[in-house]
Image (cartoon, rainbow, N blue to C red):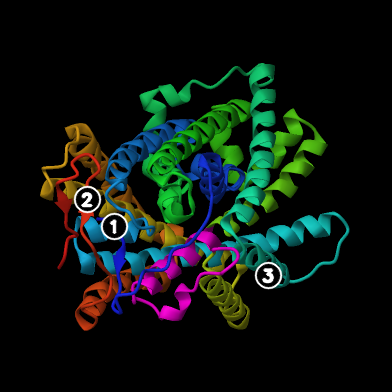
Amino acid sequence: MSAKDHITDGAEPKRLRGRLGLWAIVFIVVAGAAPLTVVGGPVPLAFAIGNGAGVPAMFIITGAILVLFAVGFTAMAKYVRTAGAFYSYAHEGIGRRVGIGTGYVALLSYLSLYVGMFGLLGPAIGSLVHSLGGPDLPWWSWSVIALVAVGVVGYRSIEFSGVILGVLLIAEVIVVIVLDTAIAFTGAHGQGLSTGFLNPETIFSGAPGVAFLFAILGFIGVEATMVFRDEARDPDRNMPRATYISVIFIAAFYAVTSWLMVSGVGEATIVGVAAESPDTLLPDLMEQYVGKLGADIVLALFVTSILACILTFHNIVARYVFSLSARDLLPRKLSAVHPRFGSPSTASVMVSFAAAIAIILAVVLGLDAVGEFYTWLVGLASLGYVVLLVVTTAAVIAFFARHREIPMHPFRKLIAPLLALVGLFAALVLILVNLMTLVGDNVVVAVSVIVLLIAAFLLGPIVGALRPNSAKQEPITTSATPAVTVPSAQQ
């Protein structure tokens, strides 16, 4: 029996269409992690208010935790036959009502991140254009132009987005590799390469918890491989591989680059230099080791990196809207599939509309683009994302505990997920402890973030009770044991 969603009218559920290959999926996911944006933003902040020269170790630790997460995540993938990632896993592992609540939290978290990024993009475009002699326009005007462009691309087939994201990602990775190579081969101008990330005293200096927090934020979206399941070629083979490749690449990229940035500045001075001007640390290093042209290229690619990130999250949010509406958890009309592109076209338009409304509200309320609009929304998304990782890992453990008949090595179905759960729960505690920092020391916003996430999750049991025929899924047949059916968890 195939694992297709049961919908209330008994009709065949709608499916998206696409031919994404392995590397197209990797490009989409890694572009969402926005490598250059993270290297130019969160990494300098981790140096300044985290553990300085010990930051590279935090990326290694975070990468290890997320590899453990991926072990259980991909082990369960063959039994979750529907796109939806967090929603589908929680539904199958813990139960229908928890799954619904998880779906709403995922939608709120990713929508907040998607919308908030326009607050970072607008000023970045404005600064770049102004430096090139262009007009000095308000941030929101550049954000609206970008919103229209992203909306047009996101409306089309996912392969079209994949090509654009691949080009942008390759460009930003190359420029960072050029900087890494320049620092490595010059021996950091005689200072020698840093070894602080190997020294426990350095790793645990300063505020390692804050550095760990920034490291976790650099991986947002790595689970999104499963969101594109219906649009991928050979998903049972390509989705797990794309997940592992994405996690390992991101961890290695951030760890190596942050290590060489420390080397380029110097272990003894990295904290002070980063604290003095975190926003210019990357271009300053580029100018010092590569030249003025390199610094100018970094400024331009910083903008395209944010744009690539926004496009990835536009696609992810549109597919969450599609997935929830196809299961009667949002208005059914949002589950329309474009007859030519095979994309969630109506959902895509609604996502663009939601972002436009948010930008208008920000302007009307006079919010600062970065200090308030971006910071508040990304703070909400960060907390929500780690909650989703914790719930999903728990769902994996619960699923295999309930279905002991599935042949699977204990490391994949229990040991690795348990270890991941410990690490992710630690990250969740760190985010809660440092939530004020994430939202710009605003108590009202911090409380609002927690209330919104709790309210979104509680919608699951409420909607589940009010609409008992929504979001049900048929039993799943294991490929390894054809005679055994695995029923969906129900609550």
Q: Quadrant of the C terminus?
A: bottom left
Q: Earlier in the sequence, mark 2 or mark 3?
A: 3
Q: Which residue is mark 2?
A: 477
Query: Which amino acid, mark 2?
Result: Thr
* Residue 265 placement (x, y as % from top left): 62, 30
- Residue drawn at x 53%, y 43% is 21
Query: Which amino acid, mark 3?
Result: Val
Q: Which residue is mark 1?
A: 3
- 154 or 64, which lies in front? 154
- 206 or 250, which lies in front? 250
Residue 485 versus residue 245 in the image, above or below: below
Q: Answer whether residue 416 is magenta in the image.
A: no
SS of the residue under disc 3: helix
Q: What stretch of residues is rendered in magenta?
A: 313-342
* Residue 223 placement (x, y as % from top left): 40, 49
* Residue 457 placement (x, y as % from top left): 28, 70
For residue 334, side relative to residue 35 (left or right): left
In the rendered structure, find residue 148 and report the number of the disc placed on it: 3
Q: Answer whether residue 339 is magenta in the image.
A: yes
